[in-house]
Image: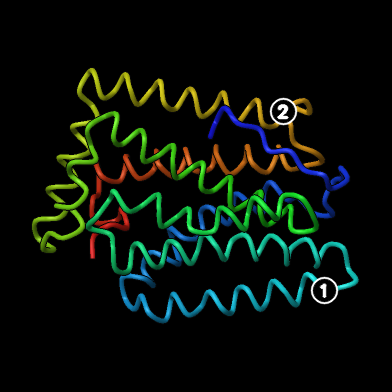
Amino acid sequence: MIGGTWQTSAPARSWSFPVARIAAAMVVLPVFLQAPWVRLDPFSATLFTGVLVAAGLVMHQSRSQTTSDLGSLLVGFSGSWLAGCIFWGWLRAHPVLHLPVEAFAVPVALGGLQGRWRLAATFYLSSLVGTACTDLAMAATGVMQFWPAVVTASLDQAPLLLHQAGTHLLQPLPLVTLVISAFLVLLAGRRLSRNDSGFTGDAGSMAAAVLITTLWVDGLFLLSSLLQPGLSGLIE
């Protein structure tokens, strides 16, 4: 998905607010809000998707361009929110299902690229790209094998297992693989932010911000798994 380009027939324009910054904040938000909520009550967190969609649809009908654009972005965010709630709420012990669940709205998002929902679709697809990059890096470095054990372990065992997963990434081959993966993501982000990347308006900048923010979140997760595993968000 890094190498692909997303074309749209919608006219190019710049959005009426700092879309890249808002999108980056929406990438970080699940770490602090969604993760603990899903651990506490996945059902209510999943139902909250309806609130996000309803708010986004209402805002999108506003005569204010800023409010309308924010509503579109919120609708795109709701797709990622719903997928995250379903996976982390009930399927987290099965990493092979992560990407399929996250990608449930791809057909709708691809259709949305052609019209007024371009902002929503771009955010959702960019988030999916970031998730795919993370999962592929985990598989390539061999750390995916720790996933089921960590998320199903008892409270006293989970921090130790997560720390072991973090130290595994410090071995020469996984570390080199991790560095190369991070470099490729940064390179993709830089290309997406350029005017000739195949995006129109600020879509490339937003996609780049989502990818790079995902990389930073992954880096912080690795750091927490090494220094304070209990703060990682994976342990109940």
Left or right: residue 2 compared with residue 16: left
Helix, strand or loop at label 2? It is loop
Name the colour scheme.
Answer: rainbow
When the figure is inspected, residue 103 is found, relative to residue 205, above or below; the finding is: below
Figure quadrant of residue 204: top right
Per the rendering, the mark at residue 112 is: none
Tell me the residue at 39%/72% (across/down).
37
Residue drawn at the location 36% of the way across and 75% of the way down: 42
Q: In the picture provided, is 12 more to the left or to the right than 203?
A: right
Where residue 158 appears, as percent x and y from the top left, is 14, 55
Identify the mark at residue 61; answer none if there is no mark.
1
Q: CA distance from mark 2 to mark 1?
A: 30 Å
Q: Within 10 Å of the Cα at label 1, are there few (<14), some (14-19), or many (20+) other Cα atoms?
A: some
The percent coordinates of residue 174 (x first, y second) are 26, 24
Q: What amino acid is found at the position of numbered circle 2 in the picture?
A: Ser
Q: Which residue: 58% across, 45% down?
A: 126
Q: At which x and y percent is residue 217?
A: 44, 45
Quadrant for the C terminus in the image: bottom left
Q: Earlier in the sequence, mark 2 or mark 1?
A: 1
Camera-side residue: 207 or 230? 207
Q: What is the secondary structure assignment of the residue under circle 1?
A: loop
Q: Dot 2 corresponds to which residue?
A: 197
Q: In the drawing, does residue 3 fall left or right of residue 18?
A: left
Q: Residues within 10 Å of mark 2 (few under 14, many from 20)?
A: some
Q: Is residue 219 above or below residue 181?
A: below
Name the amino acid type tagged 1: Gln
Identified at 50% across, 64% down, the residue is: 81
